[in-house]
Amino acid sequence: MKTQVAIIGAGPSGLLLGQLLHRAGIDTLILERQTPDYVLGRIRAGVLEQGMVDLLREAGVSERMDREGLVHEGIELVFAGKRQRLDLKAHSGGKTVMIYGQTEVTRDLMQARQASGAPIVYEAGDVRIQDAKSEAPYLTYLKDGERHRLDCDYIAGCDGFHGVARQSIPDGVLQTFERVYPFGWLGLLSDTPPVNHELIYAHHERGFVLCSQRSETRSRYYLQVPLEEKVEDWPDERFWQELKTRLPRDVADRLVTGPSLEKSIAPLRSFVVEPMQYGRLFLLGDAAHIVPPTGAKGLNLAASDVSTLYRILLKVYREGRVELLQRYSQACLRRIWKAERFSWWMTQLLHEFPEKDGFDRRLQETERDYFLNSPAGRATIAENYVGLPYEPID
């Protein structure tokens, strides 16, 4: 088999890249080691930056998002029990965010892929990348007990943090930057109406809280917990009670509780590898970078990687501008490090750190005071939260 762009991973970034390239007349084949149901079963983020919303519209997969998604013009921040609304639209030049679950984004992209007839292979095992530094790279994979070969021009590694793409790059090529945080997020998904019409980010002496949502009838809540905590130690009743304890009284009083649909604990990490390419292999999304979820940047950063590679490949195939391929990593990393900084900063601002002393506490308090009581500070939070502009490809 042969294709122009081989894509490893059928999560939202792989599917979105495939959709954009297909609409541009560039052949792709997607390999995914899991089943479609498994991919759709992943519970992930639900805050889409303006840039990702625009990219989904460009890809022709926005009809349901535009119909069912919730446009949010602000967020609430809570410190010392005091609620403060940050008007994102007013402080970012009119930009907003969209509440629309990653599962729904993936579902829409899957349906578009199926409708287009473009090939996708699920349950593709033992994927191996060969000759990535040559002008004729190829992949091999197992399907139904047989090994197949896929020749291609370029390879897009959209297969996540634990995928084969990054692991295929030889030792000594990549430089890794990492920060592991001393706590995790315990998340609960429930079919209950959100406690607030906008997201609430709350600091409390017992730990951070996020009140998020997927729709007007489905809510997602998070509690900061020590890394050693286990999900089985958190029955629903304990979760709801702790959530109420950490929220302002007026918010806690209107919280609607119910049985959990899903509960999990996610560790927090900042992670970046440089460069994000090796020959004709390009890393996208979690394959190249991880952010703590405090800034709502994970899925959105993957989308900006997709936009960058898509626009470069358009110029390569349409204009023969192969020199642009060498700019992929640099263009992506400029935006990635800004998002890493914002996510790290939001995590520092809102969480309780076990080793925090009096000096650290005063700095944390002063940061909040400045950024929330200064027009410049509010604008800085807002423009980063709604998403910085994508890097242009000239």
Image: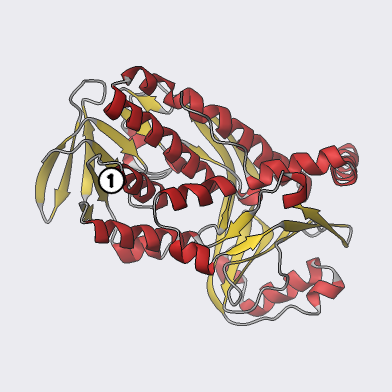
Locate residue 160: give its quadrant: top left
Model colouring: secondary structure
Spot occupied by residue 30 in the image (x, y as percentages of width and height): 26, 47
Q: Is residue 110 left or right of residue 93?
A: left
Compare residues 142 and 284 and report the one nearer the observer. Answer: 284
* x then y, percent, for residue 8: 30, 43
- Residue drawn at x 70%, y 81% is 256
Report if residue 172 is visible in the image: no
Left-right relation of 314 to 263: left
Q: Is residue 357 left or right of residue 201?
A: right
Please state, as top left, top right, bottom left or bottom right, where the N terminus lies in the image: top left
Instruction: Note whether 84 is above or below 5 in the view shown.
Output: below
Residue 83 falls in image quadrant:
bottom right
Query: Image height check: is 313 above or below 193?
Result: above
Query: 299 or 222: which is nearer to us?
Result: 299
Residue marked by disc 1? 22
